[in-house]
């Protein structure tokens, strides 16, 4: 017995050492360990390949389990309209996200990937989600409490599909409505845009009072990491051309385009996306002075910086002309995560070569990875990497749709009410013998939602998702005895042969996104103008404009009795009828200047030669209808 005691002690010692090393190995997975120690511990175990993998973001269509595990990929995204299946359920989304996540967790260090998606007016890629008004309408409300609630609702719907990260909000200050992304901007006024950053604590949760400035924050499984975009000056390009050059002084850049970023950083925004645009000729994706010097060092932003879709490719013209240079310029500028999204092996190979050959210092890689890990640790991804279906009932919930309906009501702007102020047309009477509803946007859910809805460019028609068209809302609101006649583009004879009490004409822009929406003329496409002329020339009419920005309306204004800017209201068209019929008053005030002619552009409040059709801040009010 005495002889065998030494081997037994040795075995026990060996077991102790093994268990001790196990505990040490899992130190970074222990939520009780201080955050910086977790980051340091994990990074000390990472190879260069694992670090570069964390900096790489793939599109879901190429994010196979094999690619995720082989290259240690840190992030995956859905591009606009990229879905696991047509009309996919929350369960289908969760299953897809978890399949990718399990591949990430199967790697030696088990670092969870972070899945990102555009959720710019609700969970806009997903069938049956609540689609809120686009930002151009929300800016009209000047209501940060409402905007925060929209952030909270959006976070729940995104989490319902297993996704913890959104590319929102867009805090661009659109200075020229010819820009195809103008509807993604809250206002031409940086003060309003700054106020609307309250959506960030809605998405992420309220940052604790004792937090260090610039520290990212996400309050658990019902919240998502947010992304302020597009840094910086994207709304100020020459002639509003998308991805173009913003020509402005440093003082002007800081005074107009930077204030919302300052607030976003203070509110703990987790990530910041870089703009495709240039500032005074220098591409933002290669601008180290602004990305590292200003955002990271001066504003003390401690989350991670992400490129836009193939953003580093576009550092050169034409894009991808000198990719190794683009990789060097983008990473050196301070971009931490690169949205590749398809040719990821080329990016990984180029960046690996540059680090190994001291073209990019390992300290720059370590800064990027530490920032990415900080966000992942903060949002609890290590503790809760696998999504479940506990929030599936939040997708398109009645409560969220009611919130969207409220947002629609508050975003409407009444620009004209009656041929004279003494004879207002609105609110409309619910009880009439027969009324006419006309226009290309009256019974078209896709048109009223706009771009970034189900697909990148949006869809026309009413079978894209579930919601209420403005026509259906009108039918639901008027007295049951009122006959509602819908004719998309009636001629004058049709109108004269029917005895209509009044007409509602709903026209506007077709759906578009980004460059496809750039417009130098800003006219309403036919048959919109013809419908206005035919209807309003024959009968009392209210025209409802469904657009992503101010459009040319002056030539038709004298024919129109009442004019309403409804912007892009989303799925809850009932909010439009609520206000037209006086169940709620018009309260919205323009957050954008409404021009007379495009020759005046760019024209913003405070300009010397300010001569608008409707000035910034304009908006008539109405009383409630008494029934």
Image (spheres, helix red, strand yellow):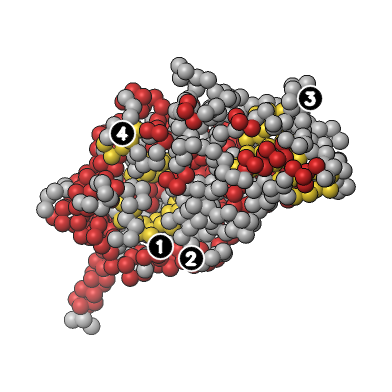
Of 98 and 433, which appears nearest the observer? 433
Confirm whether residue 366 shows in the render: no
- Mark 1 burial class by Cα count in 10 Å: few <14, some 14-19, many 20+: many
- Marks 1 and 2, Cα distance to the nearest angstrom? 9 Å
Q: Are marks 1 and 2 in contact (CB under 8 Å)?
A: yes
- Marks 2 and 3, Cα distance to the nearest angstrom? 54 Å
Which tag, 2 or 3, sits closer to the chain's start? 2
- Marks 2 and 4, Cα distance to the nearest angstrom? 37 Å
Place of residue 116 in the rendered image (x, y in percent of width and height, measured from the top left): 43, 54
Tag 1, which secondary structure? helix
- Mark 4 burial class by Cα count in 10 Å: few <14, some 14-19, many 20+: many
- Mark 2 burial class by Cα count in 10 Å: few <14, some 14-19, many 20+: some
Q: Which residue is mark 3?
A: 423
Q: Are marks 2 and 4 in contact (CB under 8 Å)?
A: no
User: Which residue is at a point 79% across and 38% down the rendered structure image?
Assistant: 502
Q: Which residue is mark 1?
A: 60
- Marks 4 and 1, Cα distance to the nearest angstrom? 32 Å
Q: Residue furthest left?
A: 357
Place of residue 405 in the rendered image (x, y in percent of width and height, measured from the top left): 67, 44
Where is residue 22, by image quadrant? bottom left
Which tag, 1 or 3, sits closer to the chain's start? 1
Confirm whether residue 88 shows in the render: yes
Which tag, 1 or 2, sits closer to the chain's start? 1
Q: Are marks 1 and 3 in contact (CB under 8 Å)?
A: no
Which numbered tag is attached to residue 279?
A: 4
Tag 2, which secondary structure? loop
In front: mark 3 or mark 4?
Answer: 3
Q: Are marks 2 and 3 in contact (CB under 8 Å)?
A: no
Q: Which residue is mark 2?
A: 84
């Amino acid at each position: 017995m005495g002889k065998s005691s030494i081997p037994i002690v040795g075995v026990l010692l060996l077991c102790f050492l093994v268990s001790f090393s196990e505990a040490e190995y899992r130190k970074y997975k222990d939520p009780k360990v201080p955050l910086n120690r977790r980051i340091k511990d994990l990074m000390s175990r990472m190879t260069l390949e694992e670090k570069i993998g964390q900096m790489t973001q793939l599109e879901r269509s190429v994010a196979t389990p094999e690619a995720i595990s082989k290259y240690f990929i840190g992030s995956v995204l859905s591009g606009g309209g990229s879905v696991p299946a047509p009309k996919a359920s929350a369960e289908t989304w969760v299953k897809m996200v978890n399949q990718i996540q399990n591949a990430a967790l199967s790697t030696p260090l088990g670092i969870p990937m972070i899945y990102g998606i555009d959720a710019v007016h609700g969970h806009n890629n997903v069938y049956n989600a609540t689609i809120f008004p686009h930002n151009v309408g929300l800016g009209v409300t000047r209501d940060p409490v409402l905007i925060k609630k929209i952030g909270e609702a959006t976070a729940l719907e995104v989490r319902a599909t297993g996704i913890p990260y959104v590319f929102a909000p867009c805090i661009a200050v659109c200075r020229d409505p010819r820009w195809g992304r103008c509807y993604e901007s809250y206002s031409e006024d940086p003060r309003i845009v700054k106020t609307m950053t309250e959506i960030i604590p809605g998405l992420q949760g309220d940052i604790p009072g004792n937090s260090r400035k610039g520290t990212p924050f996400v309050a658990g499984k019902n919240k998502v990491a947010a992304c302020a975009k597009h840094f910086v000056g994207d709304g100020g390009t020459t002639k509003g051309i998308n991805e173009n050059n913003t020509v402005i002084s440093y003082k002007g850049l800081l005074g107009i385009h930077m204030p919302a970023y300052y607030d976003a950083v203070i509110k703990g925004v987790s990530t910041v996306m870089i703009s495709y645009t240039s500032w005074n000729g220098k591409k933002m994706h290669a601008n180290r002075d602004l990305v590292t010097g200003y955002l990271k060092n001066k504003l003390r932003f401690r989350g991670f910086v992400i490129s836009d879709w193939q953003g580093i490719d576009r550092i050169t013209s034409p894009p991808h002309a000198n990719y190794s240079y683009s990789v060097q310029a983008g990473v050196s500028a301070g971009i931490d995560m690169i949205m590749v999204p398809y040719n990821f092996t080329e990016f990984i190979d180029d960046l690996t070569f540059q680090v190994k050959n001291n073209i990019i210092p390992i300290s720059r890689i370590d800064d990027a990875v530490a920032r990415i890990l900080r966000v992942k640790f903060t949002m609890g991804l290590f503790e809760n990497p696998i999504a479940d279906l506990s929030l599936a009932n939040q997708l398109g919930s009645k409560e969220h749709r009611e919130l969207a309906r409220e947002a629609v009501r508050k975003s409407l702007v009444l620009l004209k009410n009656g041929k004279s102020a003494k004879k207002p047309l609105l609110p409309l009477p619910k009880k009439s013998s027969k009324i006419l509803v006309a226009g290309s946007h009256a019974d078209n859910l896709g048109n009223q939602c706009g771009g970034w809805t189900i697909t990148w460019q949006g869809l026309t028609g009413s079978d894209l998702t579930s919601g209420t068209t403005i026509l259906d809302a009108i039918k639901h609101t008027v007295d049951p005895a009122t006959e509602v006649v819908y004719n998309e583009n009636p001629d004058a004879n049709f109108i004269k042969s029917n005895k209509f009490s009044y007409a509602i004409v709903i026209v506007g822009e077709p759906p578009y996104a980004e460059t496809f929406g750039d417009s130098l003329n800003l006219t309403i496409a036919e048959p919109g103008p013809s419908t206005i002329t035919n209807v309003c020339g024959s009968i009392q009419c209210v025209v409802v404009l469904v657009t992503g920005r101010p459009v040319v309306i002056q030539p038709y204004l004298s024919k129109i009795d009442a004019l309403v800017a409804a912007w892009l209201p989303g799925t809850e068209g009932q909010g439009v009828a609520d206000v037209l019929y006086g169940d709620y008053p018009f309260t919205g005030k323009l957050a954008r200047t409404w021009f007379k002619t495009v020759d005046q552009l760019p024209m913003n409040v405070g300009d010397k030669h300010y001569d608008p059709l409707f000035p910034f801040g304009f908006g008539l009010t109405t009383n409630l209808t008494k029934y």
